[in-house]
Structure formats: C-alpha cells, structure tokens
Amino acid sequence: MNRAILACVAAAAAIAAAGGGLIGVRGHLLLTSVAAVALVAPASAQTGDEPAYYQDPDGRPLYSLTPLKTPDGRDYRAVPASADLNFEDEPAAAPATADRKIKFYRNPMGLPDTSPVPKKDSMGMDYIPIYEGEDVEDGSVRLTPGKIQRTGVKSEPALPRVIRTTIRAPGTIQLDERRVSVVSMRSESWVQKIADVTTGSRVKKDQPLMEIYSPAISSAAAEYIATIQSKTMGGTAAYGRGSRQRLMNLEVPEAVIVGIEKGNTVPIVIEWSAPRDGVVIERNAIEGMRAQPGDVLFRVADTSVVWALIDIAERDLGAVLVGQPVTVRARSYPGREFAGKVSVIYPQVNKDTRTARIRIELPNPDSALLPDMYVDAEIDTGSPQAVLAIPESAVLDAGSRQAVFVAKGEGRFEPRDVKLGHRGGGYVEVRGGLAEGEPVVVSANFLIDAESNLKAALTGFSDAGAQP
C-alpha cells in the first residue's frame, strides 16, 4: 500500500513537471507550477536522506512536492525518501493477540455479515478478526481510544446535587376581594351633595363622600332623641338601646350617631364617609339623584395588597404547593421583582387551555401593580435536599424506558436502565439504576447507542450462523 502511494506521488510529480497541474491527496488539491516542479528530481534518483515530499507541520493531510509555508509562515515538514510513506491515519496500537483466539471475522464495512474463517468482501478488503473477550456478552460496547477521541465521548459521575425546578407562567393582577367595600343606602334616599371625589381618587377612611337625605333615617333619629330625652326613662341606658340599634341597622355612620346624642337634634342631611382607605374604582352617585335601597353609589378598593392570578400548565400542577415562594415580574416595570407566596390553588382545570389557576398575594405599598396588568411568575418548586443526579444529556429516552451508558474503563461502555425523577437546571434526579460516583456518558452517547445496535445485530448474525 505504501509503495503504491509512493509510486503515485512520483508519477504525479512527473506529470506536473511535464505541464503543471493539480495534485490531489486524500481529497486535498494542491496547485503546483511548472517551474516549481521542475526543480524536483525524479524519485528514482533520490537518496534515502533526501526529502521525498513535504507535509503540513501540524500533521494535517496536506502535502507538497516542493518546500512550502503555512499561511502563518511556518515551513512544511520534510519527509525523507527512506521514511514510510503512509497518507492514512496512524492506526491505534493493536493489543497482543498471540494468546487470544479468534472468534469470528466481521465485515469491514460494518454490514451484518460475519464469517468463521478469513475472507474478503466484494471490494477485496479483508474481514476484521474479532477475538474472544472483545465480543462480551453483557451488552456493553467497546470502543478504541482513537474512536473515543474522534467522537468526543465525555463522561461525568453521578453525584448528589440540589435540583432547582422553576415553573414559569403568565397571569394578571386582580384586586383582593376581601379589601373591596361598597357604599349603598338601606333606605330610600336622595343625594344632596357629593364631595370632590371621582373614579380613581384615593380616599382615607372616614373621609366625606356625599351628603344624603333619608326620611327613614330622620324618623329613626327623632325617635332616638325622644327616647334619650324622656324624663321618666331617659337616664336608663338600656331604654334607648333599641332606637340606637335602628340607626345602626340603617348603616348610619357612628360619627353621625354620636353627633345626634350630643346635639339632641335631628339632622336634615347626613354626611356619608368612606368605609376604608383605598381607591374609588366606581362612582354612580349624582347630585340630586334618588337612591333606592341596595343601589351601589361608591365602590372603594384597598390596593395595598393585590392578587396575581397565574395559569400554570396541567403537567406542572403536581409540583406546586401552597406556601411556595414566587417571584413576579410586571411587564410594565422591567428589572423590578415582586415577591410573594402561593396562597390558593383553585380546584378546577380549564378544559380548553388545560391550565390550572393559582393565587399569589403580593404586597403593593406604592400601588405600582394595577388591576388587569399582565405579569410573569416564576415558582421555585425545587427541594433544598440534595439528590443523586446526572446531566440530562446523559439520558437516552425511548418513551417507555430511559437508559444511560456507564463508562466501565478501557473503552467499555455498559447500557443501563434508570428510573428518573425531577428535572431542573440541566440535571435529572436518578431514583434507581445508578450508584453514586458511577461515570455516565454525557456526550456522543447517541453514537455509542448506534454502535451498540450494530454490535447486537452482528452478534445475532454470528449466533445464527453458528447454529447447525
């Protein structure tokens, strides 16, 4: 083979000397000029110490018949004529085979064809001998060091790691239902005057909202005054309790009742105040209007605490628990985070979107979060306890089973089924099939899997051929 290549190189040199041309070596074309090749003496006239050709200094398959430099200015390495001319990759050192017995011969092109005796294929290539011990029966795969290096096989041990799993889901901001108050009348009334309060105004508790006139309230107030001013029973505290309760049932503000007790007069109009601190989110009161019992005149909401209603995928529902920390980011405030906890998991799944809704309570002291604002939530569902884990790239997932390749040393890799758990941060929990410290293949494992399938096929053909 080497002599044939040397003869080809010499012939190529002669052809180039005649007219110049292109010399191809393993798919690399090198342009030579007539003048340059003319300086090269015929191969037959070279002595053993004269360079037969020049090779790339980095060992790449680039050759020249004349001295040449690389693009960065380095000289090509001179190869003397006495050297073994071999343009193929250096073969790996073959192990000693004197004491080993050949089990069978394998097709050199990787075809599922074996032979118990030496033979050649249709192209004249020798079948590869397989020795006892190389074809192990435990399902493992053996690769040569050269193949391991070329395919980039890497391994990493299975070690205890803390797996942090983060669920990301969108949602909206809603008001806390427990912090919304309605101002309405419990008797027929007329709105006499409204304070300078509109929708969106921020009010304080007991701040005046409007003045109303109600015949029912006036009648109850007159009865209360007559009761507490009675000469016979006025000094008895329990005597006026029923009249006072009637005013309270009409939801007359406590400050108005105290004023009636002190002034002993029936007010014509009554000043109605805000029931809590918050924002006026609805105003239906108009000066001079007639308000029927139950009509909503004002709606006031406290926005110091709001809800984030998050829709998470049905597959993530089992990992979410009440009390887990949540980080919420509003699209209106890039870079700002709002911290909260899962407070409620609603007991229903949306049949159209296949999502479940959870509720997160968020402090909102500066009222930055507004109702119906879009937000993105990150729920930390990881456990602080370390578990045995391997990189996700090590897992070969076939749907019904998951497997990894365990590096056993000396180029041998053993396939093994594993039971997996939580995933997160590029790692997956191993609940069975691996021990701590065992190295698993994390790169080029699909190539090893292909080699394993080929080996299984060849072994099957071999066993079938051995049967009578």
Image (cartoon, rainbow, N blue to C red):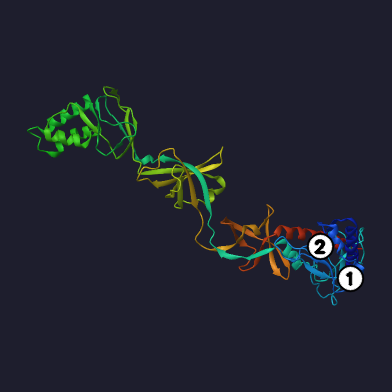
Q: Is residue 58 left or right of residue 300?
A: right
Q: Report the residue marked by disc 1.
A: 46
Q: Nearer the viewer, residue 59 or 22?
A: 22
Evaluate whether residue 111 shows in this view: no
Residue 390 in which image quadrant: bottom right
The one nearer the camera, 434 or 468, is: 434
Q: Which mark is residue 64?
A: 2
Q: Is residue 46 visible?
A: yes
In the rendered image of this protein, does residue 30 appear above or below residue 50? above
- Disc 1 versus disc 2: distance between alpha carbons? 16 Å
Label 2 packing within 10 angstroms: few (<14), some (14-19), many (20+): many
Query: Label 1 is placed on what type of residue?
Result: Gln
| Quarter of the rendering containing residue 263 | top left
Q: Nearer the viewer, residue 426 or 123?
A: 123
Q: Are marks 1 and 2 in contact (CB under 8 Å)?
A: no
Query: Residue 261 placed where, x, y %?
Result: 14, 35
